[in-house]
Image (cartoon, grey):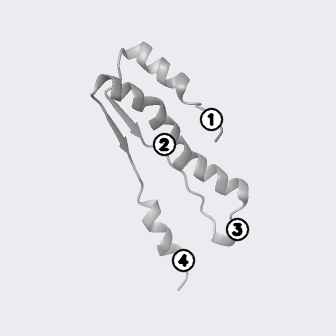
Amino acid sequence: MPAMPRPAATPRGQAIAAFGRIDVLVNNAGITQPLRLMEVAPETWARVIDVNLTGVLYLSQAFISHVRERRQGSIACMSSVSASAAAASLPG
């Protein structure tokens, strides 16, 4: 399996250089698209997945080694009520 890109490695290094250590990573980014199911284009779907899932994966991967090395720290992942509110907008 090919190695996954690590785009979060630079922000990790910058944060540790600025603060000396990271105690908590909070993954709190998320987007939605106010579209009906049949209106969602592939590029729109890819953008939602990139922000909501891939960003969480890469940031968590980048920081988990720091947390493990220190044997201390937390990674928190936030969600939104938008995930449950989507069903309310569907007809029927």
Q: Residues within 10 Å of mark 2 (few under 14, many from 20)?
A: many
Q: Secondary structure at mark 4?
A: loop
Asked if residue 37 lies left or right of residue 74, the reply is: right
Q: Are marks 4 and 1 in contact (CB under 8 Å)?
A: no
Query: Percent x, y for residue 13?
Result: 48, 19
Residue 3 shows which numbered tag?
Answer: 1
Instruction: Find disc 2 in the rendering and name its residue.
Output: 56
Q: Quadrant of residue 84?
A: bottom left
Q: Amino acid at mark 4?
A: Leu
Instruction: Give the residue type at disc 2.
Output: Val
Q: CA distance from mark 2 to mark 4?
A: 28 Å
Q: Quadrant of the N terminus?
A: top right
Disc on the earlier residue, 3 or 4: 3
Q: Secondary structure at mark 3?
A: helix
Q: Could you tell me which residue is drawn at 51 percent across and 24 percent down?
A: 11
Of residue 75 and residue 33, the one placed in the foreground of this image is 75
**Along the horizontal axis of the image, is 21 left or right of 14?**
left
Q: Which residue is mark 4?
A: 90
Q: Nearer the viewer, mark 1 or mark 3?
A: 1
Query: Of marks 4 and 1, which one's residue comes earlier in the chain?
Result: 1
Q: Could you say whether the residue bearing mark 2 is in a helix, strand or loop?
A: helix
Residue located beneath label 3 in the image:
39
Cα distance in 3D space between marks 1 and 3 = 34 Å
Can you say whether 66 is above or below 86 in the image? above
In x, y percent, where is residue 41? 72, 61
